[in-house]
Image (cartoon, rainbow, N blue to C red):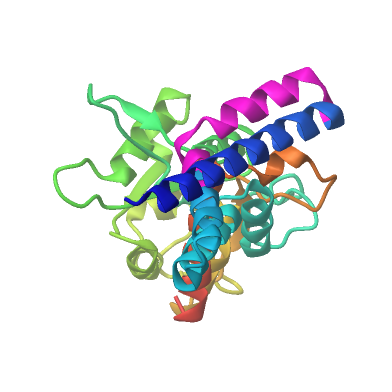
Amino acid sequence: MSSGWIRAWAVGIAAAGVLALLLIVWTGVDGGRSPAERAATSLAMPVALIWLLLFAGTIAGGIRRQTRLTTLFAIAWLTVGITFNGSVAGRFLRSHEYPAATDPAAGLNARLDAVVLLGGYAADNRFGVPQLGSDGQRLLLAAQLWHAGKTKTLISTGTAAGDARDPSRIGRELLTSIGVPDHVIFEVPGLNTDAEMVQLKAFFEDPPDDWRQLVGWTRGGSQMEPRSGGPSIGLVTSAVHLSRAMRLAEKRGLAFLPLGCDFNGRPAGRFEPRSLIPSAGAGKTFAIALKEQLARIVGR
């Protein structure tokens, strides 16, 4: 590397340091010492360091008048700054959460025949013990509905790929561990949401006799499909996933009552300087919302 590039990078790194210091001081003036300390910690994390390095590269390329290189660094810096930004990711996620004016479960008055609990919220840890993941609120809501007397049965779904245990089985174990009777829990397979809907369709078209007895339906009764005149079925999943799940259910001719949870989208609020600092957590949130956006585009 020539001495000119060394000097350019030195200036760029110094500029990145000034940017970091500015964000810390701005946060401190805006919110006090504790937020400023959290801002400093956030800036020391890998994603923020990459963001600052890209900023330094943009400055260095500009000093060396390398237009193409400067443009590439600037685009990368902006991309990281936007897709790993907590405010942007939170609003993006909120735009994909199933619209609900109030908490869906709070307004549930009539007792449902069944609540479908979609898998994907738990897995076995390295000791083979079931462990909740980031979507664990799904299981809590399903259990709460049972204990509140708002459903007669629960249907746990999901099939695992490879050697992992099926989410439907893990769901049963976790539900029984918090007091839900085993005999009211039923399992339905499915490697993904669409496959789960196919299997749920088959379940409701010809449900097992013990489920019929629990919900009070006989083989000579009305259609078993969860349509008008059929069983009342609730669908529990994360709010950001619920829109896709409802689309796929409708595609298979299933009519579910949407019962969303995990409402993690961020509403528009007061601006905080620390929100400009990118983070891995925000990147994960953005990726979840982007996955739902892509599913919507391709009609899934």
Percent across and percent down for residue 68 are 46, 73
Q: Is 16 colored magenta in this rendering?
A: no
Residue at 85% x, 28% y is: 29
* Span colored in magenta: 31-52
Q: Is residue 266 left or right of residue 259?
A: right
Percent across and percent down for residue 113 are 55, 53
- Say which of 181 and 3 sits in front: 3
Q: Residue furthest top?
A: 33
Examine the rendered structure and indicate whether residue 213 appears above or below residue 226. Answer: above
Q: Is residue 17 visible?
A: yes
Main SS type for the magenta part? helix
Q: Is residue 251 left or right of residue 209?
A: right
Q: Quadrant of residue 100?
A: bottom right
Q: Is 45 colored magenta in this rendering?
A: yes
Residue at 35% x, 51% y is: 2
Residue at 85% x, 32% y is: 30
Percent across and percent down for residue 232 are 58, 60
Percent across and percent down for residue 263 are 65, 47
